[in-house]
Every structure is written in C-alpha cells, then in structure tokens.
Amino acid sequence: MIMSIINTKVLPFNATAYQNGETVEVSEADLLGKWSIVFFYPADFTFVCPTELGDLADHYAQLQEMGVEVYSVSTDTHFTHKAWHDTSETIGKITYPMIGDPTGAITRNFDVMIEEEGLALRGTFVINPEGEIKVAEIHDLGIGRSAVELVRKVQAAQHIAANPGEVCPAAWTPGADTLAPSLDLVGKI
Amino acid sequence: MIMSIINTKVLPFNATAYQNGETVEVSEADLLGKWSIVFFYPADFTFVCPTELGDLADHYAQLQEMGVEVYSVSTDTHFTHKAWHDTSETIGKITYPMIGDPTGAITRNFDVMIEEEGLALRGTFVINPEGEIKVAEIHDLGIGRSAVELVRKVQAAQHIAANPGEVCPAAWTPGADTLAPSLDLVGKI
Amino acid sequence: MIMSIINTKVLPFNATAYQNGETVEVSEADLLGKWSIVFFYPADFTFVCPTELGDLADHYAQLQEMGVEVYSVSTDTHFTHKAWHDTSETIGKITYPMIGDPTGAITRNFDVMIEEEGLALRGTFVINPEGEIKVAEIHDLGIGRSAVELVRKVQAAQHIAANPGEVCPAAWTPGADTLAPSLDLVGKI
Amino acid sequence: MIMSIINTKVLPFNATAYQNGETVEVSEADLLGKWSIVFFYPADFTFVCPTELGDLADHYAQLQEMGVEVYSVSTDTHFTHKAWHDTSETIGKITYPMIGDPTGAITRNFDVMIEEEGLALRGTFVINPEGEIKVAEIHDLGIGRSAVELVRKVQAAQHIAANPGEVCPAAWTPGADTLAPSLDLVGKI
Amino acid sequence: MIMSIINTKVLPFNATAYQNGETVEVSEADLLGKWSIVFFYPADFTFVCPTELGDLADHYAQLQEMGVEVYSVSTDTHFTHKAWHDTSETIGKITYPMIGDPTGAITRNFDVMIEEEGLALRGTFVINPEGEIKVAEIHDLGIGRSAVELVRKVQAAQHIAANPGEVCPAAWTPGADTLAPSLDLVGKI
Amino acid sequence: MIMSIINTKVLPFNATAYQNGETVEVSEADLLGKWSIVFFYPADFTFVCPTELGDLADHYAQLQEMGVEVYSVSTDTHFTHKAWHDTSETIGKITYPMIGDPTGAITRNFDVMIEEEGLALRGTFVINPEGEIKVAEIHDLGIGRSAVELVRKVQAAQHIAANPGEVCPAAWTPGADTLAPSLDLVGKI
Amino acid sequence: MIMSIINTKVLPFNATAYQNGETVEVSEADLLGKWSIVFFYPADFTFVCPTELGDLADHYAQLQEMGVEVYSVSTDTHFTHKAWHDTSETIGKITYPMIGDPTGAITRNFDVMIEEEGLALRGTFVINPEGEIKVAEIHDLGIGRSAVELVRKVQAAQHIAANPGEVCPAAWTPGADTLAPSLDLVGKI
Amino acid sequence: MIMSIINTKVLPFNATAYQNGETVEVSEADLLGKWSIVFFYPADFTFVCPTELGDLADHYAQLQEMGVEVYSVSTDTHFTHKAWHDTSETIGKITYPMIGDPTGAITRNFDVMIEEEGLALRGTFVINPEGEIKVAEIHDLGIGRSAVELVRKVQAAQHIAANPGEVCPAAWTPGADTLAPSLDLVGKI
Amino acid sequence: MIMSIINTKVLPFNATAYQNGETVEVSEADLLGKWSIVFFYPADFTFVCPTELGDLADHYAQLQEMGVEVYSVSTDTHFTHKAWHDTSETIGKITYPMIGDPTGAITRNFDVMIEEEGLALRGTFVINPEGEIKVAEIHDLGIGRSAVELVRKVQAAQHIAANPGEVCPAAWTPGADTLAPSLDLVGKI
Amino acid sequence: MIMSIINTKVLPFNATAYQNGETVEVSEADLLGKWSIVFFYPADFTFVCPTELGDLADHYAQLQEMGVEVYSVSTDTHFTHKAWHDTSETIGKITYPMIGDPTGAITRNFDVMIEEEGLALRGTFVINPEGEIKVAEIHDLGIGRSAVELVRKVQAAQHIAANPGEVCPAAWTPGADTLAPSLDLVGKI
C-alpha cells in the first residue's frame, strides 16, 4: 500500500554505488540526518532515462545547497553504471551516487519493481532527515519527470518541517504565504 | 504495493457526488472513454484543501478542453460537500463532481486511507480512457499540490498514448521534442 | 449480540468533539463517575436528525440537573459539526459535546454502524457511573426518538441503582410506587 | 451485533404458546402479513414482569385495532404459563399468545439470552409485515418498559411505511407534521 | 459415554432450590460426605412427574434414615417450583430440595438434556459420599420409575461400600447373603 | 452421552452367540420386529454374574410370552460361553443366546466398555420393535440387577407403546391406572 | 513395522496371569535379567492351541534349565485360563504363567492383534535379558509352531550373546562350529 | 505392523535378478499361481549369509517338487550377485533367482529394512499362490535360519490350504494327524 | 536438487538477446531439434567473464559445425550486452546470442542464482535436441572454464546419443574406443 | 539446488571405506584441513566406471603431491568394494579410499541419488580445506569424466585460494597469467 510508504521509515538496505570514479557503499543509515531524494529508473543505456537523470544532475548543486542528497537507482550493477558514465555525455555529468540494485532488494523495498521485467518503475521519493518518506510519485514508463517540480516539493516539505504550525497551500513556492490552521478558519476559506 | 496501482484497472465503486446543486451518481464505468483525474483530500471545512481544490477549479476549463474529467474525493458525505459549497467562496467556484465517500471504500481502493484518522491522504491519480492508472502521486498532509504540474503530466501521458513510438524526456511540455526508442541509440545519449 | 452490550463496560475510545466553539478531547474515561447518554445519528446536514438533536437540547438542562452528561455522535468530523452548528438554527442551540467519529471506531464499539453506508443507526445508550450500559434502543432510520421517554428511562435506572432492593414496574415515573422482590410474592401478583 | 438485528428478517422458529385456555402453535410464518411486537421477559411467577405484561394487556385492544399482534416470550414452558395465568389476577387479563421457549431458541434468535441465568433480558422488538425488525429496545432487568411509548413507536413505524417520502421527526405522534427529505433542505434546518 | 458417568465425580454446579418455603443454594460440594439421589424430570405442572415425585416423597423419611439426601431437578426456575408446590396437593408433600436449572447446566452435566425440547429425560443417579456416580438409570419420557427399586439399589450400593470384600448377587435385599470373590469359586457357581 | 442412547437406533453389529449347544449368528437386524433386552456383564467364570444371569433365565419364559427376546453379552468368546455353560449349574439353565464380543464392538456401541479392563459394565437396555432404546440402566460392578423390576419396566414400555394417549405413573404395574395427558390437568395433580 | 520390533525394548504392560492355582501379576519388568519367550495364541477352549501349548509345556523344564521363562498370552481373562486349566488334560500340564489380556494391550504392543476378531495371531517372540526382541515369528491361524525349533533359536541367540565375536551359520545347534567375521573372509565363503 | 503383513497381498515391485548366468526381470505377478519363499539377507560377500543361502540351495530341488519358488533378496545390485556367484563356491551352487534391490523398495515392502545401515534383516516369508503372506519370521542379524523347519512350515501351510476343514497341531509333519474343528471339541482337548 | 536437473526438460522461458546488432527473441522452443550449450556468467563489464566468453567465441565455429548452438546468459539487460559488445574488443568477437535475464527467471530455472547478489554462478549446461539436460557443471566465481573440455563433453554426449549400445570410458575423445555393456563383462574390467 | 551446494559446507556423514586391504572409517571431519575430491559412480562391477576410477588412480600420486585426497563413493557396501578390488585388474590399482554408501546418505547429501535406481549419478565435487564445495560437475550416466581436466580445476581453485586478489581466466593452467580485478578495468577487456 502507498499508505504504508508515506510516513514509514526507509527499510534497511546495503548497496554498492558508482560515484565520481569510485565504488561507494550505501545503506539506509546514510539517509539519516539530511533530506534525500531516491530516484528510480528502469535501465542503463536506454532512452528517456538519460534526460531525466541529466535534468536532475543540472539541479544537483541547488539541491546540495538545500542540504539534499540524491540517489539514482536501477537494477543494473555498479559496473554497468560506470560503463554508461564512461560512454554517455549526458550521464557523464552526474556526480551523485548511482546505486546498483541487481538483486532488486531496494526496488522492492519501495514497491516499484515491475516483476515481469526485472526493472524499476519511474518512482521518486522525498525522505526527511528522520528517514521517513514524505512524498511518493510514480509514473508509467513513458512519462518523464520534472526536476523543477521535485525541487518545489522538497522546499514545501522542508518549510513545513521547519514551521510546525503552518501548512503550505496549493502550488506554494518559497516566499509565498502559508496558512496556520485554527478552528476559527472552519468555513471561512 | 504502488506497483499494483500503476497500470491496473480502477476497482469498481458506487458513490454519490454533489455537482452544481445536484446529486450525481458516479461509478467506475463513468471513468471509461476519457481521461480522468481522481483527487483525494482529507476533509471538508479544513485549511490547505480549499486552496488545492480552488487551484484545480481554476484549471478545470483547460482540462475539460483536453477531454479530462476531474473528481474530488473525501470521506465526508455529499450533504457536507453541498454545505461547504454553499458557505465557502473558494469551494463555491467548483463545478466538477465532489464525491462523498463516507464508507471509505473508494479511498481504500486507491490505498490512500489513513486508517487511524478515517481521512484520505493527498493522493492524485491520472487514469487513461481504458480505466488504467498511469500516474500516482501522494503527499504527506501538509504539502500542497500543483495543478500546473498535474496538467503537464496529463499532457505527457496523452501524448505518449497518442504516439506509441515515442517517449517523453524529462520535463517535457507540449511542442517540445520527444524521443523514438531504437537499439541504435543505446549508449548514444 | 445485544446481550454483550447490556451490562458490559463501554469500550475504550479517543475522539475530538465540538462544544461551545471549542475543540474538546473525549475518551471513555470521561464517562465514569456520572450517568451518560450516548446518542448516535446518521449524518450532519440531514433532516430528521436536527429535530431529535434539538429535542434533546431542550431537555439538556433537566438532564444536567439529574447529573447526566449527553454526547451526540456521527461519523462526520468535528470540523463539519462546527460548520453545521454555525449555519443551522436548531443545531445552534446545542451546548452538549458533539463527537466526530470519522473512523467509525465508536460507532462500531456500540454495534450501530451501517457498514454499506458508513453512517450510524439511530442508537441511544444509557450508561451508569461505572461505565456499564443499562439501556439500549435502536431505531431504523426514519423513526424519531422521544427525549421525554429517554428522561423517564434514566430516572428509572437511577432509582434502581440508588435503591438496590426495589424494581420499577411498567411505565414507572418518579414518585410512583416500586416493588421489593420477595419469595412470598411468587404467584401473588 | 444490534446492526444485524435492525432490518434483518426474523429467524425461523417453532413454539408452543398458551392463549385463552388453548395450546397454540406459533412460527415465524405467523408474523408475516401484519405488524408484530415480540416482548421478552425473564420468568413467570416473578415481580416486575406482571406489571409490564398487564400494562401491555391494557393496550392490547388498541394495538389490535392498529393491526398489531403481540407475543410475550419467556424461557418457561407453556404449562407454566397456563399455571401462572390460572393463579395470577394480573396475568389472567392477558389474551395475547404467551410463548413458551424452554430451549431458549427464540430468545437467542433475538440475542437477548442471559446465558449464565437461562433467562431473557427485557427486550422489545417491533416487526413489520415483511418480518423485518424495525425497532429494538433492551433494558437491564430492573427497568420497566412503557406500553404508551411502545404504541407511539409502532405508530411512527407504520406511518413511515405507509408514506415512503416522509420521515418522522423527534417524538412524533399521529397527526403531527412529518418531513419530506430534499437536497434543498441541507443546512436549512 | 455412560462409561464416563459411572465412577466419575459429579461435575461442579451452582443452583437455587426451593425447599420448605425457603430459597436454598446447592452446589456439588453439598453432595460430599453422604449418599445422594439426583432425580431429573421434564417439567413442572405436567402429568407423570407428580406421581414419581410423590412416590419419592413417600420414601423420603426412609432414605433420610439411610443417610441419603434427595434432589429433584427440572429446567424450570425455583419460582415455578414454589408456585407448583403451592398449588398441587401431591407436590405439596415434598420436603426435599427442588432444584431449578433454567440454564440446563446440571442437566447437561448428567447428559440427560433433550436438546430439541429444553427438558430433562427421566434420569436417576445414585452418588456415593465421595461424589462418584455408582448407578445411572434413564427412561424414555412415558415410563415411570419405582422408588422401591431405587431404595433397593441404594441399599446394595451402601452394603458393598461398607463391605469391600463382598459383591451383591442379583435382586439382593438387605439381610440376604452376599458373595465374597475368590479364585477357587471360578467355575463353581 | 446417555442422551444419544435413549431413542436412538441400535448400531449395526455382527456377532456369534452360543445357544442350546449351537452356534448362532446375531446382528442388529434380529432385534427388529419384537422387544429385546440386551444384558451386559463383565466376564464369564466370575461371581455376581451367574446369579444375575440365572435370575434372568428364571424369568425367560415370562419374557418370551411377552414377546421379548433376551441377549446376554460379555467380551469373552462364544467358545468360552459354551465351556462355562457346560461346567456351571446356574449357567447351564440358560436358553437365551449368549453373545461373544471379543472385539468389544457391541460393548462400545452401547457405551459400556471399561477401557482399562476390557470388560463390560453391568448395563441393561430395553429396545422396542423399531430397534430404539427406551430404557438404559448401568450399575457399577458390585451392584446386582433385579429381573423382576426389569420385567416391570418392559411392561410399562410395552403398555405406552400400545396406548399412545397414556403415560404410566410411578411404579406402575399392569392393570393399574394410567394417565392421559391434557392441558386441563395442568396444576390439578 | 517388524523392523521396529526387532531390537526394540518390550513396551510397558501390566497383566494378571494364572499359574499353578494362583493369581500372578506380571509386567515388563519381570522380563528383565533373563531370557523370555512370549507366546501368543488366539483363544482358550479352541483346537490347535492346546497342542502348541502342550508341546511348549513338554519343553518347559529344558527351557527353565537354559534360564528361559515362558509366557503364554491370549485375549481371554485369567478366570477363563483357570477354567480351561481345570477342565483340559493338555492344558492342565502347564506350569508357566498364562497371561490374560482382555484389553488387548499386550497383543497390540507386539502388533499381533487381529482387530476384526479381537484375537491374537500365533506370534512367538524371543527376548533377551535386556528386554530386547531378537526373534519374531508369526503364523497364520492354521499353522502350528514347533517347540523344538524354538528351543534351537533360543540356543543360537544365547550363544551369540555370550560370544560377541561369532555368528551362527544356518541351522546351527549347540556344539556345532560358528563363524568369526573378518574382512579376509570376504569372497572366501 | 506384522499384523498388516500376515494375510495381506504382496505389494507391487519390479526388480532385476541374477539366475544361472542370465538377467531375469521379476515382479509381484511372478509370485501368483504357485507357493513362494522370499528370503532376505543383509549383504553379498559377508559371512552367515552364504551358509543360509547354501542351506536353502540344498533344499531347492525338494521345494521345486513341492511347487515352491525361492527368491533371495539383498540391497546389492544383480551385478554384485553375479560377481559373488562367480567367486564363491557356496553361492555358486545357487540356481534360484537372486534379486537385486539397490533402492530398497522390496525390502521396505516387507518391512525388513534396517534404515541406519541400508541392509535387510534376516526375514523369511511364505506366500501362497494368491500372493498372500501366510508366515513371517525375522531374526536379528547373528541368528541363522533353518531350511528344514522352513520346509516343514510350507508343508503345513500347503496342507491346510488343500484341506480347508483341518488345522495342523503343533510341530506337525506330513502324514501326521490333523484336527477338524467342531464346537463339540470345546473343552475336550 | 542437481538430480532434478540432469535428464529433466529445460523449463519454459522467454527472453530478449543481443546478437550481431539485432534484438532476438529466444524461448525454450528454440533449444529443441539441436544440441545446445547454455553458459551462465555473473555480470557484464567484469573481469574473468570476458576471457571465458572469448574462449567460447573462438570455438563457436567448431560447435556450429557439430550442430550445437551456444547461448550466454547474465542478469544484465540486452541493452547492456549491446553496450558491452560495442566497447570491448574481446566481447566484440562474439556472434552467438547473448541473453539478457534481468528478472533472473532463466537463472533460477537452472538453479544458479546467487540470491544475495542477484548474479549467476558460472554454470554450464549441455542440452540434447529433446531439450534434456545431460551435463551440468558449476564453478565458484573465481574458477574459469575450459572450452576445449566443454567441446569434448558435447562430443561424448553426441556419440552416446547416436550409438545407444555404447558407453564412453573416461577421457574419451572422438575416434577412441567405446564400450558396449554386457553381463559377461561383469568383473572382467 | 546446485546453488545450495556451491560454497556450502559438506554435510555430516559417517561411512566405512575399503583401502589397501583395510577397513577405514571416514566422516566429514576427515575432509577438513586439506583439499578433497569426492567422486561418485553408479555401481561396482559395471562398465564405464572402472576406466574412470582407473584414470583417477593414475593421477592419484600427482593429486597427493598437490595435497589432495580422493574419495570414490557408490551405494555398494565396502565388502563389495573389496571383492571388486580383489578381482578386477583396473580396480586393483586403486589406493585411495573407496567409500561404501548402502543407505545412500552421502549420495543424497550431494544430491546425486537417482531415486528410481538406488544408484549415484556421475558427480564430481572439489572441496576446499574449510569443507566448502567449490566445483560441482554431474554427467548423465554414459558420459565419462576426464581426470586431466579435474586436476586443472583443482589447480585453479587452489591458486585462487592462495592468491585472494586474482581470478583465473578461461582454461587457465598453472604458470599462465591471472587477472587482478579493479574498477579501472571495467569496459577495458
């Protein structure tokens, strides 16, 4: 159930990622203490994915300033990630960790495995510093995601977490007004 | 599992909605033959919801032109929907059907019930004319949604459905280029 | 089973009520130490209910003098209760707590949920200061209740509780004779 | 569950009753085609019961005119009913059938058996000509019932059945106004 | 199984009996320390039963001298027992406790309940001071029992208990010879 | 349960009996069409048994005149029955069939097996021509039975069977009055 | 399984035997410390059995000298054993214990019960002083056994037990050569 | 259970045997229509076995004249049987089929597998022309069998089968008297 | 179990392979009618694998002449196979189909999945034209395979299949002698 | 599963082997501390097996120098192994232990039992000094194995174990180059 994803803790995992020419070990413990985006895509060396991953790479500096780490995940190995990084101009821009999930364990933890293909759906998850999933978004395979909108969601989530008495109205962006709930407002909006 | 939502058919339901001063019966059969958005929110007479529902009302004419019907759903009755519509300026703008789901049956069909509160999560679903869910998006309660981005996703989904040989790259909007997959492109992007 | 209701203790619950412009938390612990009436009805903003709730509001001062608290319950939220209280003249008279039960937990505790509608039957329960249910009365939806008869039942229940050696004969009202059981009376009445 | 009683059909039974010096066989089929009251009490030759049964005997002519049959039920045999009828002045007035239920089958059908005593609770049930239970009322043992209020409930139930578009407001009696539900009334009462 | 009755201990019970104008509480503990007869019959105010109960009443003094208590049991209440005792000449002679078993618990302990009627079979049980059943006798409803033969059986049972080395031959009465078993007697009788 | 014995049909069995120097096959079919007594005892060549069996042999002519067949049963073989018949004067008088039940099948059919000894209790059963058990009587091992009383019970059972409208009062013997049940007799005896 | 018999310990039992005019209690403990033969037969007072039992009686002195006890067993009682011993010349010669097994417990311990007859097969078992079964032999009912061959088997079993390094070749009798196993003998015999 | 062996039919099997320099297929169908001996032993190339098998080979001509076939069985393969037959003088005499049972299927059919060793116990079975086992004999490993006694048992079994009215007394050999059972003989032998 | 692999049929599968710049669909049906080698390795872009795959590519012409098809399998996608083929000189030599098994279905069919890594063991399988596995060989990850020896095994398997009466002795190569089994050879080799 | 064999520990076993005219006890503990080959074959005194076993005997000295022990295993007994060793010239050369596995326990431990024949498949296993299986190879019955290739595999396995940072490329033999894995090599081979 989606319901069991939102506000649940990220399940334990151990994985090997490729990042900047190095092998990096990643586990769920690395997600604690800062905001994270976990970004699933179907397979290396395919077509929509590079533009999504490149779009995200272009916003990586902004996300880093916001204190957000990004992890891309597919069911390929980290060896294949390196080979793709070496040969693709778009992918070569990426400096965030690219997690290899050949067993599908992480993909199944987030319930985005397409079992009949062994590949992940296009699922995006925003996770708070306590390791709790706050936003979940899944697209059927052909529909690309927007990094700009993703950044906006993280901003809204961070704002609410920092200002417990407020809630963000529709399409809020930083600087816009928020609302503070009160019984007097019932029926007034 | 989210996975069981994407590309599955909408489950059968029967509900009563309030629309333009009338009582309307709605079932899953009404979703067939056109694109639909099913838009869940926690409760009438609360705070973030009106702005989200109003934001969606402001884009309703555009969505109608795109051939898309919109259904809002909460676990309140349609009597309460009418009362809210009568007394709130923002809600008074709405002309799409507002479904009452006091048993929670539809909310559970889409796996967005918060069982300990009896209220729905902020879940949005884009459904194609065959009744299959193509996009799922769920926010924790405080994080508002964007109608603009929702329109963009429907446009991408409609474009792919109309052009089977293409896929939409990241953050695609109508008029931008799309990609046609081919083995020759492997490793070239 | 009804049998499991009569003389059983009220099951634990936690709820939010609307009362006199305030939000009030109510639990089963609040029912201990005094007599209580728990009064279920199907839904806010509907038709028979307001007259029943108003009839009860008219007898609230008398019941308070008898040391009895009154709780009305429906599966609407307390936000909706406030909105109804703000807009309805009849409901605006109410000063007893109006409990919101959107999860249906309390309604199911008293076995009066109509599962296929998500609404409560017209069930009335008289509860003694030990939290034990002494009277249960349930009507099909169209049949209104009588506050006068309800007051009489509470009086009879209170009289018996205060005078352990007596039982109330049919249609007893305060001041009338009661009976003290004895083997000698067998076959004499 | 009480909920399973209201609007369910009376379960099948076969019983022997005492009526006017005769032995009468009664089954659930006898309840079809007219309105019925099934009136449980704990035991013959005890104390509150005679006054309740006598109170009901005094209203029997009125109920007969309304087309209502009355059945009293206890777990005694019909032999004991006859003996009680022979020796008690109050019981001697009764002309409705007194059903003997020594196996407790009918008492359990209506969920009013006190299993640890083998006796029935003071349960009253109003049943329509289709054999469906429309009103259920159960008192703890010491609290006597009112035949006047019982007649009022039957009148309300009969009125609704005869006038499908109306509902009875609180404490309605024949001749008073009723309400016809309509969406326009939402929030107007 | 009958086998599980003979030589088993009487199962625990609690009951209220009518005896000499008083209400008496009886339990299995009252059966210890002396010989007892437990005498089941179908119902008060019926036909064969009074003669059997009167026959037993006529031998009660003799049984008391033999140190034997007698308990009659039916599924009527003790209120009904009193009423019968008040109105029947035959039953009015009885001075032994008449147990009311409206739940059928004792009747089922001795496996003599006719479930489809809620009445006891004509079962008679002789129980020794250790609470063990030594004789069981059950008749179909129409066949009356003989108090004389019952007295003879108790005499035989008491004689054997008092003279461990002897066994009673057929139709033995006090004063007649008994047999002392010995291997030498094999094939000699 | 004893209750399951009274008024149940005799279960099927096949056995070999010794009778008058012959081997006789007996089954439950032989019990149909006339009254039967099935008379269990623990073992051949023991002590009480011969007197009981001899007492019964002395009444066999009277029972035959009444149309009653007698079967004695123990868990010995029919070979042993013959040997006992040859060597014991008392047993030598017997002319009714002596059934051998070395498997204990019949003994268990009537629930009178003492499992820890492999021997039958002293159980007596009166069976009507329809093969239904009407009287059951079981004694602990040392307590002998009375053939006279057994004859009286058969007479009462036969009388009731022949006169459906009558019941036998206590200790009835042929020629004495019986009772015809009627509602008018309630409370008159 | 036979396999579970050979080399398993005799299961616990308690039985009463007839021996030399006395009643003797026998249990599995009596079999420890010496060699035993347990000799089952179908029934007393039948035909083949006496000759087998007499044949064994004729070799009893020889077996006693060899330190072997003999127990015959049937499902008859020890009372019947005595009666048979008193009346049969062949059986009268027996001085070993004749065990009565009316419950069939011992017969089932050795898996030789014919369940549909309640009688034992002709089974013979040789048991060593540790209570372990070393030889099992079972014949269908008509085939008599040979005491001479039985004595030979016991001799072979005793010889092996006393001379651990040897094994007895076919048809060995005391005094004949035995074999001492050795790898060098492989393929040499 | 041994009991399930005696008088049961031989279970189906398929096996390869070595006989007279040939490979022979054997199944349970080959056992029908004549008497058979199935003779298990632990293993080829061991010590007691050759003498038992040779003893049996010496009586093979006699058994053939009696119409009896002999099958030896061990869990070795028929290849090993041939090798043993080639190299051992004793085994070289054998002309009956030597069955190889490397799966242990036949050995388990006759319940003579020693599971912890994978070898058969010394089990001998006499089987009639209907394929029913009439004699079973099992020895612990060190105790050799006697072919002479085995021949005697087969003679007794054949004699009984040919003369239904007779039974063989103990240690019978052809030409000796047999017994014809009759009720008159009870207690006379 | 390995045992369930040898001589079992290849389980059904559907897969996409990369071969000579094309996408090729492969299923178990493609293995029928000729000999096949299925050759598993852990992952593309790793170290030992290229030499093994290249070694096999060097013998592919010889195997094709022998009528043998070769399939390599890893849990990578066919997109990754193409990318590897494009960038690696050794892999670029390959002209046999390279199957992508991202779901692991084929890898699990042959029981060579390392579940904790999502990668295949180095398993080699020789399959006959009936689709039956005749040779299975699995190495721990570091131990490379020999294409020469693999060719020899296929030759032996093909020779046996073509010459049913022969078996191949150790280390046989084409042209060397084979053996024809016969009972006469037992013990002669 | 094969997967459960590779890298699992050898399961516990106890067996008797024939070696150099002696009986040797072997258990899994004997495999620890050195490299081992366990070499299964179907049966003694058959045809392909001798050449395989002889081929292995010819390389035994080389394997001993490499510190490798060899164990052959079939489901014959060690007695049969000795007999075969005595009579076959080829087998007579063997000096490694020949394990007898008549229960099939070891054969099942390695999953190479052909259950319907009771014989082992031609399975070869290379085991490291920690008792872990590193190579598994199984042939259908007619296909002989190569001792030369087996020696090569052991050499590769030993080399990897001694040089943790290296892996052996295809068809490696001692002295040839090996590879040291490194991320830099990805896509370079």
Image (tube, coloured by chain):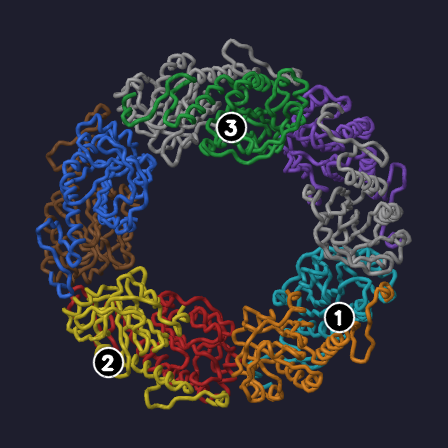
Chain colours: A brown, B blue, D green, E purple, G cyan, H orange, I yellow, J red
Which amino acid lies under the numbered mark 2 shown in the image of this protein? His
Do the residues marked 1 and 2 share a common chain? no
Is the C-beta separation of discs 1 and 2 under 8 Å?
no
Which residue in the protein does label 3 denote? D34
Chain of the residue displaying label 2: I
Residue D118 % position (x, y): 60, 30
Give the spatial CA distance, label 3 vs label 2. 95 Å
Do the residues marked 3 and 2 share a common chain? no
Which residue in the protein does label 1 denote? G142
From the viewer's perspective, tell me whether residue A139 is left or right of residue G18.
Answer: left
From the viewer's perspective, tell me whether residue G179 is left or right of residue D146.
Answer: right
Residue I185 % position (x, y): 48, 89
Between marks 3 and 2 in the image, the one whose residue lies nearer the viewer: 3
Which amino acid lies under the numbered mark 1 shown in the image of this protein? Gly
Q: Can residue A162 be seen in this view?
A: no
Taking depth in this image into account, of D31 and A145 the one nearest to the observer is: D31
Between marks 1 and 3 in the image, the one whose residue lies nearer the viewer: 3
Taking depth in this image into account, of E135 and I91 the one nearest to the observer is: E135
